[in-house]
Amino acid sequence: MILESALVRLYGDKGFAAYELLPLKRSDVREAAQQSGISTPDAFLERIEALAVTPLAIKPVTLNFLINTYLRDGSLPSNQIELLAGIAKIPGGRNAPACRSMKPRNSLPGRPQVSRQMGTPSRVTY
């Protein structure tokens, strides 16, 4: 609300309008998949449900990532970890040059790395 008020002051009532974007519905996701060239949109939806990544599918930006991954690979990865690792490889993701040069907050001089503080897990289970 603060940002909205500031933008109205900056652009005036006629130069600015605020809209609330609602999450995409299943039918929206199916239609986007079909229009993007996925020949089996129902199989795409089943993979989304099987991976429990519906929160990614209901947002246009992350839905686009899922669609592009599906089109490129013919399916979605076998688990969430592989899928999310793919996000880090996209331009602007964690492997982007700007992100590679950033130091995590815990790597400041005089602060031990988190892995040294807590130990690095050898296996993650769900």
Image (cartoon, helix red, strand yellow):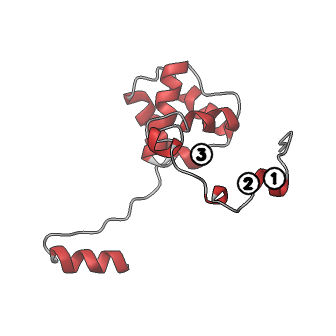
For the N terminus, the image quarter is bottom left
Q: In the visual, does 123 lie left or right of 22?
A: right
**Nearer mark to the viewer, of 3 and 2:** 2
Q: CA distance from mark 1 to mark 3?
A: 35 Å
Horizontal relation, residue 104 to residue 17: left or right? right
Residue 89 is situated, as x and y percent measured from the top left of the image, at 53, 33
Q: Measuring 62% from the left and 39% from the top, which residue is drawn there?
A: 84
Distance from label 3 to label 2 (Cα)?
33 Å
Residue named by callout 3:
54
Q: Position of residue 57 (x, y in %)?
A: 53, 43
For marks 1 and 3, give the one nearer the viewer: 1
Residue 103 shown left or right of residue 81 in the figure: left
- At label 1, the amino acid type is Arg
Task: Give the residue number, with chain letter if any, for mark 1.
Answer: 116
Q: With respect to residue 116, does 9 lie above or below?
A: below
Tell me the amino acid under the disc marked 3. Thr
Nearest to N terminus: mark 3 or mark 2: 3
Q: How many marks?
A: 3
* Identity of the residue drawn at 56% across and 29% down: 44
Seen at 29% across and 80% down, the residue is 5
Labels 1 and 3 touching (C-beta < 8 A) = no
- Quick check: can you spot residue 104? yes
Q: For the C terminus, which image quadrant?
A: top right
Residue 3's image quarter? bottom left
Q: Secondary structure at mark 1?
A: helix
Q: Are marks 1 and 2 in contact (CB under 8 Å)?
A: yes
Q: CA distance from mark 1 to mark 2?
A: 5 Å
Give the vertical position of 49 relative to 40 (above or below).
below
Badge 2: few (under 14), some or many (20 or more) residues near its Cα, within 10 Å?
Answer: some
